[in-house]
Amino acid sequence: MSRITPQNETPEMLSALLPGKGGRFVQAEIERYEPRRVVTHGVGGRDGMELRLSRSIVGKPEADAVSRVLLDDGYLGMGNEVRLFEEELAAFFGVEPWQVIAVNTGTAALHLAVEAVVARCGRIGGKAEVLVPSLTFVASFQAVSAAGCVPVACDALPETGTLDLRDAEKRLTGNTVAVMPVDYASNPWRLDDVYDFARRKGLRVVEDAAHAFGCSHRGRKIGSFGDMVCFSFDGIKNITCGEGGCIVAFDRQAAAAASDARLLSVEQDAVRRFAGERSWNPDVKRQGYRCHMSNIMAAIGRVQLSRLKTEFAPARRRLAALYARCLAHVPCVALLQSDPEDFIVPHILPVRISDGRKDRVKAALAAAGIPTGTHYKPNHLLSFFRAGPLPATERLYAELVTLPLHPGLSDGDVKTVCDALARAARV
Ligand SMILES: Cc1ncc(COP(=O)(O)O)c(C=O)c1O
């Protein structure tokens, strides 16, 4: 059964309620992000189901696309569908098709991107180091260490949860080769400053843009500029392939290295597969991995990409704006900051609960049937990556509670969450 979630936003409402009302490009983007109803195909919202923290919104169009691959084409691995997805992503970002490298997870995108840039950093004494904010999914840290580097945990800015550059600068050593900013909660906060910092210090930038598909920074789309920009298309991201990810590379050699590395470093294997051929007489010159994208994943991703501007982005932005309005005057609850020049399509909605009330609030919401999350337990507190202390990150961690957000929620769902939160925060 198809369920339609009512939508009533206008571009004016969006721009008035959420950051993103300033820049020229941003305004143009809002106009192009033409809101339509989110078709949830019976899997969204509450309708007889529990209210979820996040979920995939997929349905008949995605099922039809998968059927086409299974039944018409019958080529399930990496082929034409992946080529088309890469081309469509390139058009979306406004880059050349060679710059987009589709892989099977966002973690693989980060791993291959780090490895590709580190291989080109020349000789250093000891292990290469990458500066990473501790407040991120463990995937960022694991990707750096999988690439044979040391992830150096850095502190967060309390107002946004993003990388504190002043702290990162203190952690520079002769072995630092790269910095990995994380667009935490889809917020590309002061990303230009990170790129300037990297330029001044001679570092490569592997941007963890797992949360930031569809966002823009000061008028430029995330993925349209940078060095190595990595996205995730896992089940609950702004668009999904089921699982998946991509790198957008701005350096031909690093792009070629990452493209080969996803196919066991069989040279030019992707190019041959896209031409319907295979590499029967290959050469392999370096370590490679088996982490390419399949035609099945790409078929889902292509449909999801076509739904972003009309369904997913407007719905996520409208719901986040509604949260902002409903929580504006709730004591002890604060939203994270964002830059009015940035355009944010929020993947998650973390808020800060002050005065030591976080656990009580989480328990009260759980009792009311409202799930919450924690994004994230800082990586420097995990056994494998233990470091620290990082005071701002730890203070923020003590306050962060993630509220439900996905395009299948209704305005009523958001109001239910906010009412329960307001009650819980007052106790
Ligand atoms: C900040 C961050 N980085 C990296 C990843 C890894 O992406 P994937 O799950 O596609 O491997 C995620 C996914 O949740 C993420 O949230």
Image (cartoon, rainbow, N blue to C red):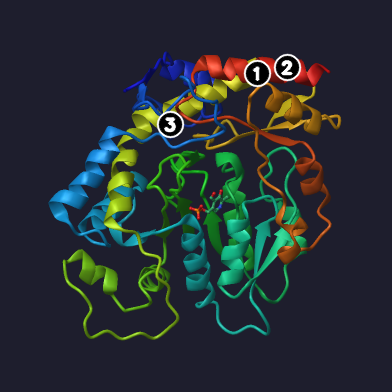
As displayed, is residue 389 above or below residue 145? above
Name the residue at 15% across, 54% down: 73
Q: Nearer the viewer, mark 3 or mark 1?
A: 1
Q: Count how many numbered circles sit on residues in the image.
A: 3
Q: Is residue 203 visible?
A: no
Q: Which residue is mark 3?
A: 313
What percent of the width, then of the height, locates residue 44? 43, 27
Q: Quadrant of residue 323?
A: top right
Q: Which residue is mark 1?
A: 418
Q: Which residue is mark 2?
A: 422
What percent of the width, then of the height, locates residue 210? 51, 49
Q: Is mark 1 within 8 Å of ligand 1?
A: no
Please tell me which of labels 3 and 2 falls first in the chain.
3
| Dot 2 amino acid type | Ala
* Crowd around label 2: few <14 · some 14–19 · many ≥20 (10 Å): some
Name the residue at 79% across, 24% down: 332
What percent of the width, then of the height, locates residue 64? 22, 39
Q: Quadrant of residue 320?
A: top right
Name the residue at 46% across, 61% down: 109
